[in-house]
Image (spheres, grey):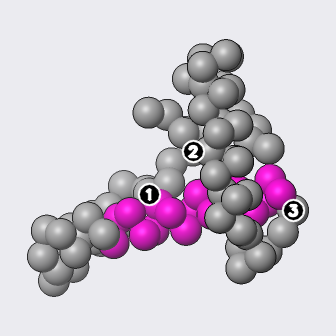
Amino acid sequence: MPSPQQPGTQFLSPDESAAVDAALLSTPEKFLTRLTISSLRLLVKIAADYEVAIADLTPAQIITWFEADSKIRREEGIDAAVLKW
């Protein structure tokens, strides 16, 4: 299950964001690129929490992980959750 996010943890670094900005991509393509990089980082975290390979994650595990992180945010506050939204 989710564990608290370490201070300063980001799913897209400023350098990566700048690299996406510099890429010869349309605005929608840049958005999708940022989303994909961030999603990869989050899948790495979820897979580590379940102690499985990313390729072995199931949709049900991902949904359960999001539910658990949402519950942590509601019950313990945003700082205790992995996702800060």
Name the main secondary structure of what is drawn in magenta. helix
Q: Which residue is mark 2?
A: 9
Q: Is residue 1 above or below residue 81?
A: below
Q: Residue 5: in sight, yes or no?
A: no
Label 1 and label 3: CA atoms lie apart by 23 Å
Q: Quadrant of the N terminus?
A: top right
Residue drawn at 57 percent across, 62 percent down: 41
Q: Pinpoint residue 36: horizontal percent, then vertical percent.
A: 43, 69
Label 2 and label 3: CA atoms lie apart by 20 Å
**Is the residue marked by circle 2 packed among few (<14), some (14-19), or many (20+) residues within 10 Å?**
few
Q: Which mark is residue 44?
A: none
Q: Quadrant of residue 8?
A: top right
Q: Secondary structure at mark 2?
A: loop
Q: Pinpoint residue 70: horizontal percent, then vertical percent.
A: 60, 32
Of residues 7 and 30, the one nearer the viewer is 30
Left or right of residue 33: residue 43 = right
Q: Are marks 2 and 3 in contact (CB under 8 Å)?
A: no
Q: Which mark is residue 12?
A: 1
**Is the residue marked by circle 1 packed among few (<14), some (14-19), or many (20+) residues within 10 Å?**
some
Asked if the magenta segment contains residue 46, the reply would be yes
Q: Pinpoint residue 48: horizontal percent, then vertical percent.
A: 79, 60
Q: Secondary structure at mark 1?
A: loop
**Region in magenta:** 33-50
Q: Which mark is residue 51?
A: 3
